[in-house]
Image (cartoon, rainbow, N blue to C red):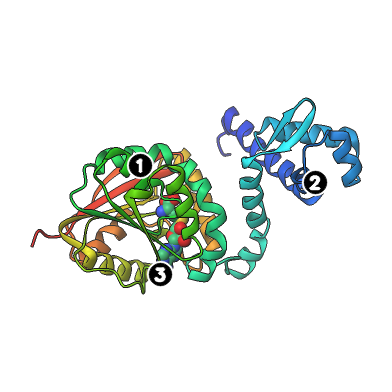
Amino acid sequence: MTAAPPADRIVELGHVVEAAAALRTAVRLGLLEQLGRGPATADEVAVRCGTAPGATGLLLEALEALGVLRRDDGRYAVTVMTRWVGTLEAGWARLDDVVRTDRPIVAADTPAGAAELYPEVVPFLTRLFAPAARQAAERLAPVDGEVLDVGAGAAPWSLALAAADPRARITALDLPDVLPVTRRAVSQAGMDDRFRLVPGDVFTADLPEEAYGLVLLANVCHLFDADTNRALLRRLRRVLRPGGTLAVVDALPSEDPDERRLLALYALGLRLRTVAGAVYPLASYSAWTEEAGLGPVDAVPLSRTPPLALLTCTAPAT
Ligand SMILES: C[S@@+](CC[C@H](N)C(=O)[O-])C[C@H]1O[C@@H](n2cnc3c(N)ncnc32)[C@H](O)[C@@H]1O
């Protein structure tokens, strides 16, 4: 007989199932869409959605308690979290298709798929990564030379670096459809004069050789298969000036039970949005960087939720 699960796991797993069901039900019955048109009481939502007032009230209260909705003076309203979980739910609701076919619902490892997914998603990543980005910036600052942020998104890592190192000058590269989000994030941070924004595909963009003292590659490698990452790191090695640093931020596998749970679902989520993305072990990064002619990788953990590490290595000095 297997050992009885600890009480907190029973509660936690039950909570996961209940919260997911509450959210899915609110999406399927149109409750969130209805509230997206404006704040309303539970009774008003029930009338408009054709649902029972009592259970509708309990469902909305549960979503408010989960932080998905806001309630002011008895009226429920959507929040920034409603959009985030709505986006997640829309993807995860199609997990059965992905498990049947092994094909993603959107291929974020292609420029077209990334352009479809990331303008909506990257502003949320910024909130998620902010504490880890500050830590990474403390380790990377001061930077000797220009910085290239590859697949910058809403630029959480380079914005933190710009804040930590007032002399840092950053080139942020992302796909043309995502770059307006980068521009907005940089402007909101009051950092326009520190950034140059370059629209392009990192695999084909015309990047200057030996131009950057630091290349940031944050949460990009997990999108691609191993051969693509190998080619990417070889390409980025060429834009690093001698002695420059490549800094990769990404998830690494972990044996810690809490991190394993997050990582296993993260890896499953990657299958929803990439053809062959994966959580790669440190050994893969070490092999790719060595093949690219970079020095040994130094890895430091940055955060447990989400589980992220900062991997750095340098280009030979001459
Ligand atoms: C998971 S997001 C990470 C964004 C940001 N670095 C962060 O950590 O929040 C991946 C980013 O890579 C960008 N990207 C994907 N493929 C790309 C390509 N071929 N060229 C340039 N950027 C790309 C996406 O548009 C997206 O902004």
Label 3 beta carbon less than 8 Å to ligand 1: yes
Question: Callout 1, which amino acid?
Answer: Ala
Q: CA distance from mark 2 to mark 3?
A: 38 Å
Where is residue 91, by image quadrant? bottom right
Image point (19%, 53%), residue name: 145
Q: Which mark is residue 160?
A: 1
Residue occupying the far top of the picture: 73
Tell me the SS state at disc 3. loop
How would you rate the neighbour count of disc 2 (Cα within 10 Å): few for under 14, some for 14-19, many for 20 or more?
Answer: many
The answer to which of marks 1 and 2 sits earlier in the sequence is 2
Whether residue 254 appears in this view of the structure is no
How would you rate the neighbour count of disc 3 (Cα within 10 Å): few for under 14, some for 14-19, many for 20 or more?
Answer: some
Give residue 283's position: percent from left, percent from top. 29, 57
Please tell me whether residue 41 is drawn above or below residue 115 in the rendered image: above
How would you rate the neighbour count of disc 1 (Cα within 10 Å): few for under 14, some for 14-19, many for 20 or more?
Answer: many
Image quarter in which the C terminus is found: bottom left
Question: Callout 2, which amino acid?
Answer: Gln
| 293 sits left or right of 78 in the view | left
- Residue on which the image places disc 3: 201
Quarter for ligand 1? bottom left
> Is label 2 in contact with label 3 (beta carbons under 8 Å)?
no
Image point (31%, 60%), residue name: 284
- Residue on which the image places disc 2: 34
The answer to which of marks 2 and 3 sits earlier in the sequence is 2
| 16 sits left or right of 255 in the view | right
Give residue 295's position: percent from left, percent from top. 17, 57
Whether residue 303 appears in this view of the structure is yes
Question: Callout 3, which amino acid?
Answer: Asp
Which residue is nearer to you in this view: 86 or 11?
86
Q: CA distance from mark 3 to mark 1?
A: 23 Å
